[in-house]
Image (spheres, rainbow, N blue to C red):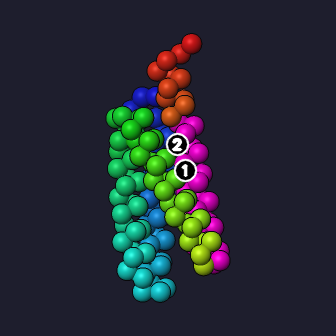
Amino acid sequence: MHAHHPHGFIYIIYGIIMLCGGVYGYAKTNSLPSLIAGIVSAVLACIAAALFRYHPSLGALLGGLLGLALAIFFYVRYTKTQKAMPAIPIGGISLLVFFYSIFLLMRIHHLAHPH
């Protein structure tokens, strides 16, 4: 994969979703932790996108770890609260980002080390 490949854009979209979720959580329930988590997640996702442009494996690794961490967080949150919102949709999106990152890492490895 070279620097112009668009796959890292998924992390920008993910960051926007996480930021919107944090802002929504703050607006709806006055939850400062939701706002802070949304901002931090968005920043990390954008860092993953920037890294992906120049160091695809590092960007995919950061994006994948972020997706996994948030999927686990929202799974635990759902098991404690039994509230589907926002745990199921955001946890599901996070899991998709994690699996997509694994796909990207496998593809990067294959392109770097063809058989």
Residue 17, compared with residue 66, is above or below; it is: below
Residue 51, compared with residue 30, is above or below; it is: above
The spot of residue 71 in percent (x, y) is: 55, 59
Q: Disc 2 on helix, strand or loop?
A: helix
The spot of residue 56 in percent (x, y) is: 41, 35
Query: Residue at the spot x=52%, y=64% of the render?
Result: 73
How far is disc 2 from disc 1 in space, using C-alphas? 6 Å
Circle 2 packing at 10 Å, graded few (<14), some (14-19), many (20+), is many
Circle 1 packing at 10 Å, graded few (<14), some (14-19), many (20+), is many
Query: Residue at the spot x=36%, y=72% of the render?
Result: 36
The spot of residue 67 in percent (x, y) is: 50, 53
Residue 80, compared with residue 15, is above or below; it is: below
Residue at the bottom extreme, as displayed:
29
Residue assigned mark 1: 97
Query: In the image shown, does 14 or 64 lie closer to the viewer?
Result: 64
Q: Amino acid at mark 2?
A: Ser
* Range drawn in magenta: 82-104
Q: Amino acid at mark 1?
A: Val
Quadrant in the rendering for residue 60 = top left
Q: Which mark is residue 101?
A: 2
The spot of residue 48 in percent (x, y) is: 39, 47
Mark 2 and mark 1 residues within 8 Å of each other at the beta carbon: yes
Magenta stretch, overall SS:
helix
Q: Which mark is residue 59?
A: none
